[in-house]
Image: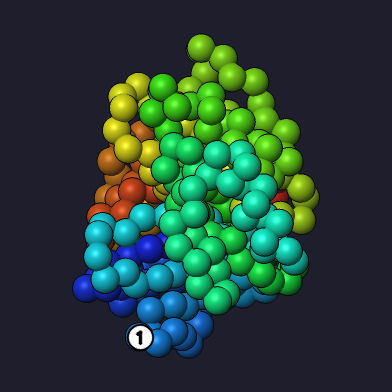
């Protein structure tokens, strides 16, 4: 599973440079017909974050799900309530029941170096209250990852990823009915130190909560720094 950062083409170069710095990675050579794709290469281990320049819209975050049988994955997703948005020779674009965009792709496995102070390893799916339970069921059944219990006093449900999987999924229940969206969460050993580092790179603090800090990068992308353990991914 890959995190894909979609960015308006007009600010893509600056955004890609920023995310390379805060993830301590190197930007790969660009690829695609218009040079619209690249990968963030970590100092060691396999990459799991990719970037894309988009011609329309504000951008956002989507997931790429690699598999050795794309057709079967697409059929499974559709059977669970997903909608196919587009088909290309190497990717099928879908949306979840709540409207979270993801892609079915093919690829190989890899290894992840988690012995770091900070790692961008979580997709947080922000879901309207009325669609939350259905969306949890969808991602739980699509990935076959166990989900934590949905409770009225807890706005979050996490899925337990396999140890070798780079990306973790967290679902957040919104109190309003705005459109579903996704953002990136970092796991950090020292949230205060990481906040200061991101601010030096040009980000701003939106608000501080117990357990996480909401940030905005210089180009408008909102993301979070959390107290999760970078090695395990789960909260400390």
Image quadrant where residue 217 sits: bottom left
The residue that disc 1 covers is 34
Towards the viewer: 69 or 29: 69
Query: Residue 168's spot in the image, x, y percent?
Result: 62, 46
Judged from the image, the secondary structure of the residue bearing numbered disc 1 is loop
Query: Residue 48's spot in the image, x, y percent?
Result: 60, 65
Quadrant including the N terminus: bottom right
Query: Residue 171's spot in the image, x, y percent?
Result: 52, 34
Up/down of 128 relative to 205, above or below: above
Query: Residue 100's spot in the image, x, y percent?
Result: 45, 46
Residue at x 50%, y 83% (from the top left corner): 28
Mark 1: few/some/many CA within 10 Å (<14, 14-19, 20+)? few
Quadrant including the C terminus: top right
**Res. 155 in view:** yes
On screen, residue 96 versus residue 18, left or right, reads right
Towards the viewer: 93 or 32: 93
Towards the viewer: 114 or 164: 164
Q: Which residue is outermost to the top?
A: 152
Residue at x 47%, y 31% (from the top left corner): 172
């Amino acid at each position: 599973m890959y995190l894909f950062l979609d960015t308006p083409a007009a600010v893509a170069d600056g955004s890609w440079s920023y995310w390379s710095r805060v993830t301590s990675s190197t930007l790969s050579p660009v690829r695609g017909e218009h040079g619209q794709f690249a990968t963030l290469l970590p100092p060691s281990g396999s990459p799991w974050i990719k970037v894309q320049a988009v011609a329309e819209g504000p951008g956002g975050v989507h997931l790429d799900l690699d598999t050795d049988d794309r057709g079967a994955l697409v059929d499974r997703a559709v059977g669970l309530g997903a909608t196919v948005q587009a088909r290309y020779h190497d990717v099928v674009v879908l949306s979840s029941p709540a409207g979270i965009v993801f892609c079915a792709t093919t690829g190989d496995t890899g290894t992840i170096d988690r012995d770091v102070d900070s790692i961008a390893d979580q997709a947080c799916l922000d879901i309207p209250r009325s669609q939350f339970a259905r969306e949890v069921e969808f991602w739980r059944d699509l990935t076959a990852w166990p989900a934590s219990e949905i409770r009225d006093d807890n706005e979050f449900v996490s899925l337990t990823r396999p140890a070798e999987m780079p990306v973790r999924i967290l679902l957040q229940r919104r109190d309003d009915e705005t459109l579903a969206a996704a953002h990136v969460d970092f796991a950090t050993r020292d949230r205060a130190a990481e906040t200061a580092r991101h601010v030096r790179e040009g980000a701003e603090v939106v608000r501080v909560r117990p357990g996480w800090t909401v940030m905005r990068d210089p180009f408008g992308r909102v993301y979070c720094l959390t107290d999760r353990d970078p090695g395990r991914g789960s909260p400390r």
